[in-house]
Amino acid sequence: MNKTVRVALVALLCVGAAACSKKQEVKPQAQPPEQVAQTETNQSNGKYTPADLDTDACLRQRVVYFDFDKTEIKPEFQQIMACHAKYLQDRPMSHIRLEGNTDERGTREYNLGLGERRGNAVSSALQAAGGSASQLEVISYGKEKPVCREHNEDCWSKNRRVEIVYTAQ
């Protein structure tokens, strides 16, 4: 079985598990009655709402890390892909920008390409889990936006990432 099929199968299994799992209900703080009624309605039908981006533990995770010189999504990030894909399905007007980043090693051109390939890998995983390509945009910053500036493996591993940025909720 090739890698694309395996990723698609794992993503579908994760979506199924996410759909069957019970979301934790977070009590809203002093909302007007009409907002409370809307929130309760959305939670009772199992669909994500924009408020879930800040309250749902899975949706709050918006960084996918990669191994050195790799573009494969690690198994520990599959559940995150499933959550964000479900959000995209529940909110068809939402849009995500996938910002690919690399560590400082390698040329500027190579790192821009690697960052784009990583962003495309996350985009493919989200689409395999049910997200729409029209809701996704990939951009690569290469090594231009590090979160850590030290010159060691621990720091480099933090810079090898794709950040999930919601541009429309």
Image (cartoon, grey):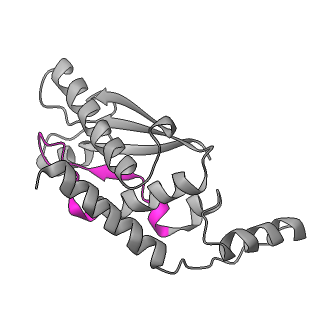
- Which quadrant would residue 167 be assigned to in this image? top right
Inspect this view and state whether residue 97 appears. Answer: yes
Where is residue 96 drawn, in percent x and y?
Answer: 49, 41
Query: Where 63 falls versus 25 (above or below)?
Result: above
- Residue at horizontal 36 percent and vertical 42 percent from the top: 123
Where is residue 97 drawn, in percent x and y?
Answer: 46, 37
Inspect this view and state whether residue 148 appears. Answer: no
Q: Nearer the viewer, residue 30 or 48?
A: 48
- Residue at horizontal 14 percent and vertical 43 percent from the top: 70
Q: Is residue 119 left or right of residue 169?
A: left
Q: What quarter of the picture does the N terminus occupy?
A: bottom left
- Which quadrant would residue 114 be assigned to in this image? top left
Where is residue 20 drawn, in percent x and y?
Answer: 46, 78
Residue bounds of the magenta highlight: 57-76
Q: What is the number of callouts on the image?
A: 0
- Which quadrant would residue 81 be assigned to in this image? bottom left
Q: Nearer the viewer, residue 100 or 134?
A: 134
Q: Nearer the viewer, residue 57 or 12?
A: 12
- Residue at horizontal 26 percent and vertical 42 percent from the top: 159
Is 125 within the magenta? no
Query: Where 4 falls versus 59 (above or below)?
Result: above
Q: Is residue 66 left or right of residue 58?
A: left
Is 75 within the magenta? yes
Where is residue 25 drawn, in percent x and y?
Answer: 62, 79
